[in-house]
Every structure is written in structure tokens, then in C-alpha cells.
Amino acid sequence: MYYVDRKQIEARLDSIPALAEALEALAGDWQGSLLQGLAQERALHLAVESVTDIGSYLIDAFIMRDASSYEDIIDVIHGERVFPDELHETLIALVQLRKPLVQQYYDWPRAELHPLTPVLPETLLSFAQAVQRYLAAEAAN
């Protein structure tokens, strides 16, 4: 039997609806203000961290292949069928934002609506549902 830290996974899954709501609101009323730019930046960063944290917990819990990068976390859990194929490309694009958001924040184009912002609400909610289905299926085995 594997140890699955459901409390930590659930805490991160529970944050996803608020992130999806914030990203949807930003995309729906984008005017490029500094405040919106900073809010978008933070929401994207939290989305990256949530997805990669959840992926890392799943990899550890179910003794999946060790990931070598943030992109690889997505590849590993995708390979284990945690989420459907149609989410893979968007989740890879999301985690590729981590370096610019965290290390190159001084160059981030805050006045621009990032192309992932309007797409992510649905993707994040689908990812969360897929993870919950995966956990339920694994618990039933």
C-alpha cells in the first residue's frame, strides 16, 4: 500500500477553482492595468505551483518514475494516465512559464493578456477533476 498525502493534494486541488475564477475574470475584463498585470502574473504562478505540487505528490505517492524537470512532472503523470491527452499541451505550456515568472519577472510583459489566461480556467478545472478521478480509482484498487 502506498502512502498518499491526500490532505496536501486536496489543499492544492481546493485552490484551483479560485485560480480558475481569477483567470477567467482577468481574461474577461482585460485592460492591461498594472494591477491586472500583477494579478495575472500571480495567478499564473500559483497555477504552475499547484499543478506541479500535485504532480509531485502523485509521483511520490504512487512510486512513479522520478521527474527531472517541471515539464517532466507533467509528462510522468500524463504517462500514468492521471489526466487526458487534451490537457497535456496546455499544462506543458503552463509549467514552462515558471522560469519567466519566478526568475525573469522584471521582463514579464505585464500590460499584455497572456494567451494561456483565457484557456487555463477550463484546463485547471479539468485537471483537478481528472486527479480526483485518478485518486478514487487508485483507492478502489
Image: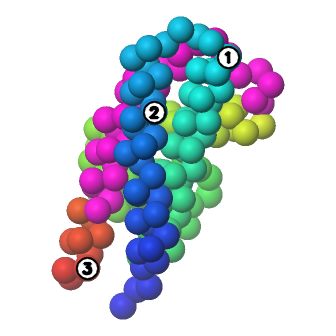
Name the residue at 67% across, 17% down: 34
Who comes first in sequence, dot 3 or dot 2? 2
Amino acid beneath label 1: Leu
In terms of secondary structure, where does tag 1 sit? Answer: helix
Who comes first in sequence, dot 1 or dot 3? 1
Relative image position of residue 36 (x, y in whole percent) = 59, 21
Residue 37, by quadrant, is: top right
Q: Give the residues in magenta.
A: 104-132
Q: In this view, does 77 lie above or below 90?
A: below
User: Where does label 1 land, which residue?
Assistant: 34
| Image quarter (top left, top right, bottom left or bottom right) of the C terminus | bottom left
Name the residue at 34% across, 52% down: 128
Indicate left or right for 114 with 90 as reference. Answer: right
User: Where does label 3 land, which residue?
Assistant: 139
Relative image position of residue 19 (x, y in whole percent) = 45, 40
Amino acid beneath label 2: Ala
Q: In this view, does 72 lie above or below 98?
A: below
Q: Which of marks 3 and 2 is in front?
A: 2
